Amino acid sequence: MNVRRFVLYALAVTVAAAALATVPVIAHHSSAPFYDATKSAEAQGPVTKLLIRNPHSFLYFESEVNGKKVEWQVELGAAASLTRTGWTTDTLKPGTIVKVVGQPSRAEGSFGMCCAKVTRPDGSPIQPGGRVMEEQQPPR
């Protein structure tokens, strides 16, 4: 009887551990509800801030749209992904001019992008050695 109880207990612990391990995978969401993959947005201007954090980092920069100054919010990858490609909080200091091309936000009147390529205005890489920050297409 004790062996049976031990096996059932071990099985329950294994199932619970497997369920907890899959929660982060299930929690990751698609960008499709928030950004339009069928369209492209392009803007350039000075960086206002770069936040490197989890689960997503963000780049903010100003640009002129229809004669008005607006602040763009660019959703980037996780902190680990950015640091692996050499990005730090000092990579894009406020005032640095960037060119960003990506998928625009679906929210009408907002200025957001994801899955973006971030370069200097002439298209050259931000990072020394030719690294260009380009988000991979997230899973849908």
Image: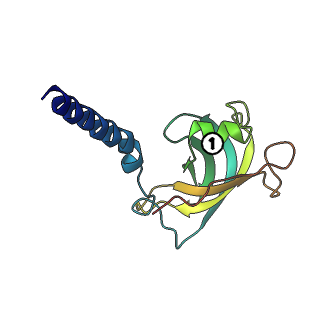
Residue 84 in view in this figure: yes
View extreme (right): residue: 129
Query: Residue 93, relative to residue 26: is it above or below?
Result: above
Say which quadrant the N terminus sits in: top left
Of residues 73 and 114, the one drawn nearer to the viewer in this rendering: 114
* Structural crowding at the residue carrying mark 1, measured as other residues with C-alpha within 10 Å and reported as few (<14), some (14–19) or many (≥20): some
Task: Please state the horizontal and vertical placement of residue 72, each as a whole percent of the image.
Answer: 56, 50
View extreme (top): residue: 2
Q: Quadrant of residue 87?
A: top right
Q: Amino acid at mark 1?
A: Ser
Of residues 139 and 38, the one drawn nearer to the viewer in this rendering: 139
Measuring 71% from the left and 33% from the top, which residue is drawn there? 93
Measuring 52% from the left and 58% from the top, which residue is drawn there? 138
| Disc 1, SS | helix
View extreme (left): residue: 1
- Mark 1 = which residue? 81
Say which quadrant the C terminus sits in: bottom left
Residue 66 in view in this figure: no
Give the number of marks.
1
Task: Please state the horizontal and vertical placement of residue 126, each as a whole percent of the image.
Answer: 78, 46
Task: Please state the horizontal and vertical placement of residue 82, each as a whole percent of the image.
Answer: 65, 40
Q: Is residue 136 left or right of residue 132?
A: left
Measuring 37% from the left and 45% from the top, which residue is drawn there? 22
Q: Is residue 69 left or right of residue 31?
A: right
Of residues 43 and 77, the one drawn nearer to the viewer in this rendering: 77
Query: Residue 93, relative to residue 101: is it above or below?
Result: above
Task: Please state the horizontal and vertical placement of residue 104, each as a whole percent of the image.
Answer: 52, 62
Q: Is residue 139 left or right of residue 40?
A: left
Q: Quadrant of residue 47?
A: top right
